[in-house]
Amino acid sequence: MNSSGPIGVFDSGYGGLTILSEFQALLPEYDYLYLGDNARAPYGNRSYDVVYDFTLEAIKFLWEKGCRMVIVACNTSSAKALRTIQQRDLKNMDSDFRVLGVIRPTTETIGSMSETQHVGVLGTEGTVNSNSYGIELKKFSPEIVLTQQSCPMWVPLIESNKHLSVSGKAIIKEDFELLISKDPLIDTVLLACTHYPIIVPYLKEITESHIKIVSQGPIVAAKLKDYLQRHTSLRGQISKGGKCQFMTTENPQVFNQSAESFMSIKVSAEQVRL
Ligand code: DGL
C-alpha cells in the first residue's frame, strides 16, 4: 500500500484520549484517528478470547480506514491480545502496517523514575492478572521490586462519570491504600490504565507527597517520537496536517460530552460499528 494515512489510536473507551492528547502535543504535525469501543467497555474483566476478538476487530477497522500504524492505547488489550495479533494476524494485513502497545514503552522507562526502586502498578484485573508489567519490567529493570493492585471498579466509574461521587472516591481511595499497604517503600505509582490519568487530581489529594504518580501518556508519546525518527519509511506513510477524527461504537453525543469534560477538548465523534 503506498497511500498515506493517519495514526490510529484505539482504546476500549475514553482512556486512550489521555494518550492521544500527549501525541498531539508532542507530534502535532501528524493526522490521528481515534476509536473508542465505548459500547463494549470495560474490557478489564473480560476473558482473553473476548479481549483478543474485540482488539483485532478494532485494529482491522482502523487499518481498513487507512491507518498506517495503530497505537493500542489500552493496557488491557496490550496485555491480553497484542502479542498474538502482532505474531499471527498482522501478516494478513500488509507488511508495512505497524501495531504498537503501551506496556513495552512504559516498562522501558518506569524503573529509572524510582529512587527507592519500589514501584507500584495500578491497573485493571486483566492487566494485573496477566503480569505483563512484571514480565516486561524484568527485562529492563530487574532490580525493581514491583507491587500490583487491580482496581476493577475504576474504569466503570470513569466511563459512567461517577469517579468523583462520594462512593466513587471511597472505592478509589481503598484500592490506592491497599497498594501502598502492600509495600510502604513504594515511591512511584504507575497508572497502568489509560483511563486513570483522569483521576490524577484526586489521587494527588490522597497521596503522601514523597510518592510520584506517573501517567503513561508522556512516556508513550516520547517513545513514539523516537520510533518514528528511526523508521523513516513508515514516517513517510503517515499523513500530515494535524487533523484528528473521533469514532465511537456508542452514542456520539455522550462521547463528545465526556471527551470535552475529561480532556478539555471539543470533539465531534462519528458512531461506527466494528
Ligand atoms: N483504558 C483501558 C486500559 O488501559 C481500560 C480497559 C478497560 O476497558 O477495562 O486498560
Image (cartoon, rainbow, N blue to C red):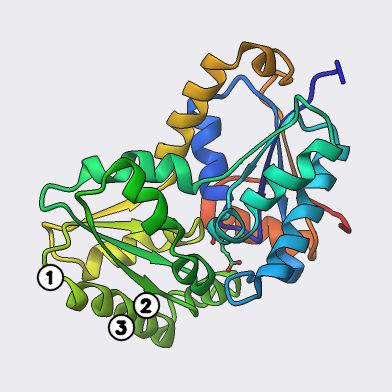
**Picture disc at residue 174:** 3
**Picture disc at residue 184:** 1
Q: From the viewer's perspective, is 269 left or right of 70? A: right
Q: Identify which residue is drawn at 80% across, 42% down.
A: 62
Amino acid beneath label 2: Ile
Q: Is mark 2 within 8 Å of ligand 1?
A: no
Q: Which label lies toward us, 1 or 3?
A: 1
N-term mark: 1 or 2: 2
Q: Circle 2 is placed at which residue position?
A: 172
The secondary structure type at the circle numbered 3 is helix
What x and y, as percent, mark residue 218?
Answer: 41, 38
Amino acid beneath label 1: Pro
What x and y, as percent, mark residue 130?
Answer: 50, 66
Q: Is 195 or 86 nearer to us in this picture? A: 86
Q: Identify which residue is drawn at 57% across, 62% down.
A: 76
N-term mark: 1 or 3: 3
Q: Are marks 2 and 3 in contact (CB under 8 Å)?
A: yes
Q: Residues within 10 Å of mark 2 (few under 14, many from 20)?
A: many
**Marks 2 and 3, how far apart in space?**
6 Å
The secondary structure type at the circle numbered 2 is helix
**Marks 1 and 3, how far apart in space?**
15 Å
Q: Is residue 129 visible?
A: yes
Q: Is 191 or 77 nearer to us in this picture? A: 77
Q: From the viewer's perspective, is 240 left or right of 213? A: right
Ligand 1 lies in quarter: bottom right
Q: Is residue 268 visible?
A: no
Q: Identify which residue is drawn at 30% across, 83% down.
A: 174
Q: Residues within 10 Å of mark 1 (few under 14, many from 20)?
A: few
**Marks 1 and 2, how far apart in space?**
18 Å
